[in-house]
Image (cartoon, helix red, strand yellow):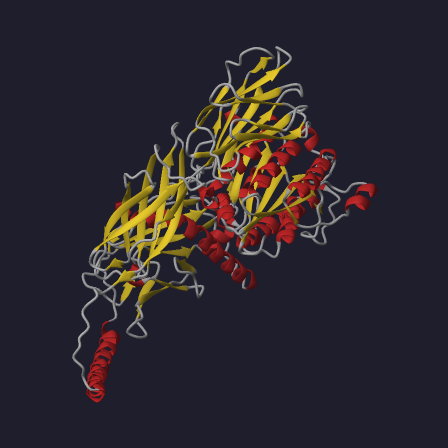
Amino acid sequence: MLVALSVGLLAQVALSEAASAQESSGRVESVASCVAAAEDVRVLFLLDESGSLRFTDPDDERITAARFALESFLDLSLEKDVEARVAGFSADFTDSTGEWVPLNDTNASRLEAEIDAFADRQSGLDTDLPNALGGAYDTLDPVDPATCNLVLLFADGGYDIAARTTPQLKADLGTTKNYAPGIEIVDAEAVAEARVLGREALCDDEDGTMAQLDDAGVRFVTIALAESDFITTDLLESLTVGRAPGQVCGKDLTGNRGVFTSVSSDELSLSFGAITGRVAGADVARSSIAVCAEGEECLGALPIAVDQLIDRFEVAAQFSDPSQELIITHPNGDDRARLSFEREGEIIISGAVAKATWIDEKSVTVAVIPTGSNELSEGEWTVAAQSTSPDSEPARLLVTRFPNLESAVVENENFTAGEPGLVSARVSTLEGRPITGVNVAARAVVTDTAGKTLEVNLQDSGADDGIYTGTVDVPIDFVGPAAIDVEIVATTIDGLEFTDAAEGIVVVDTLRSEEVNTDSTPLSTQLMRLGVLGLIFLAALAVWLFLWRRNEASDSRFELDGLSVASIPVVVRGDGALFRVDGQTRPLAMSPADFNSHPDPTPSRVINLPQASLRVVPAKHPFDERSAEATAQVPVTGKYGTSELTSTTIDANLRGSWLFLLDGPNSLEANADSANPAYGSVAGELLVFLHTRTNVQRFFQELPEQLVPSARALFRLHRNAAAERPDGNTADMLEWVDQWAGSNSPEQPAQ
């Protein structure tokens, strides 16, 4: 079930072989949720074909990795529509497939051939990431909101432009780039200038390619070769997840754009399988096993625990030579499947089938799937490797276990406001059989139309029918229909957690059924009574409106009791990190000592602070809310956006609000010269307003993600205005901006 694609995402990927060689950033769950929520999926395979691959990928491991990834998405195509396309890049983007094709067994052969062709493409002179990603955007555009668009990027990380120093190079590659018109890239100085413009075209957070891809919701899975000492992967990481040391790229700096992993070439082949398996909601574990000599008992066989929560499992294997074979043994110890490059690719094994797909003569994926309506036999399966040679190198394995878990909200009887209400959910396998004998935790949240929530833990009904129930006390003012959201966490026998979610609706009755009054009243009498009541209502409404408008005009104010204010100088560093800079530079954090209660003993209509004034904006009608307008002598932005450069509206009561007042001169100075160590920094004063009713933890979790892009957008407006009306301000940079790149830069705060 694809709702369960988010299942296993929090499970650790066990990398028992060379784990330290792999470093990941970004959020796999954002890619998984994209796939889970979409009606269909489009996957663009984007492969580097630059000359540096001769050193970073001499054995064409990226080709094997791409074929492993293709096999993973072919498996996904059994559950929802998947379209795929293959493209490459060096100096330009090259669309190999030329169209989106449905991913099925027939088209998979075509796509495999297109991927294989890249084994001979590693002589490109440039590694032009701006052109590559620009081509990817054009290929994906237009984006259907119902489609999950994925880019699988295979590269060695560098962004390189070669100087066109010979007539042949000029003729073959041209002397200009579309993002750097008018610059003849014939020497090192011109190349450097073009690279600056290329990076801006790629990473500008307003109209750069990655910002456009962010707006379109495109997700990335990138694995970069980390073997080379002369190629850095920082830019590749930042365009995949938004930020890297000394780099920011695009609008989304939260890591939600995708997942980036840096590996050595011998780890590359199985890496995409690991990530795409996690995207599919599975548990993924990597290991290395010794290869037994033929006829010997394989004491080092890898156990695979299967219980009711496991639907199927897959084994991806990479051998050191083609003579090796994989042996998968049933829990009964007798039935087994022997799979090798020259053997049959599909073997029946006690109610299941082991289906082998050979990626190349040394790499295979084997899916062990129950046949018919069976479920996979429970117990300990084992996987071993065997060879005719007693001195074989170990085999590398990737084992992926897929969940067998589904939940649904049972149709409930109507709730009655003011009385207990029963919530029921069913937990079952994908075949609809009740889940029993494993640890299941179930929780439900009921939300009415006004946003009021009720929470309850659901308990096993005890009838071995997979039904879990709980009772909520329905308030008298609960307004239906109400939404029921159920979350299930089920734990396998070896401690693996799978989750699932379900939604439902319940009607909320506001009144009990009463006996019908048989007394009748003439229609004319009823109409007369209604008319009198209507006149009384209109008169009362007129009086109330008069009194309300009079009170609002003279007494508009905030309830300032419990309001605290903090004022802290901050800087948004060039890599997108947020720092406070009062006394010493350190990641933004606040304590109660930073806040002072407002000095006015009584509420007032204006709050005057050293940097800004806050004025009450009266409600325009009785159903409107008061708000506050902040004004300052410098550009200002806030939680609720900027309408004017020096004015912004924030929420009533200033509860959980913030304002950022731009330090224009120092920000301009920092951004005037790319050689400045503070280049890209935005400075200003942060005002934070907290009320005793503020959800402080949630506010501070959201603040950095709100403030960083708002401060950058505000500075862009200010910079453009300054460019049109230069004021000659050359204020020196303050000493509170640390160098944002290099070994001395402060650690980036956790987001």
Relative to residue 188, is residue 215 drawn left or right? left
State left or right for residue 332 relative to residue 411.
right
Judged left or right of residue 594, residue 208 is right
**Number of marks:** 0
Q: Residue furthest right?
A: 167
Q: Is residue 743 visible?
A: no
Image point (43%, 28%), residue name? 378
In the rendering, at what x and y percent does residue 315 appear? 55, 28
Looking at the image, residue 266 sits to the left or right of residue 699; the answer is right
Q: Is there any visible trace of residue 354 in the rendered image? A: yes
| Residue toward you, 734 or 679 | 679
Foreground: 67 or 371? 371
Query: Height in image: 423 above or below 546?
Result: above
Q: Locate residue 158, reporting x and y percent.
A: 63, 37
The residue depicted at 42 percent of the width and 30 percent of the height is 307
Q: Quadrant of residue 437?
A: top left
Q: Quick one: 652 or 84, which is closer to the camera?
A: 84
The C terminus - image quarter:
top left
Q: Nearer the viewer, residue 547 or 326?
A: 326
Residue 33, how many percent across, how many down?
A: 47, 46
Question: Which x, y percent locates residue 452?
Answer: 28, 57
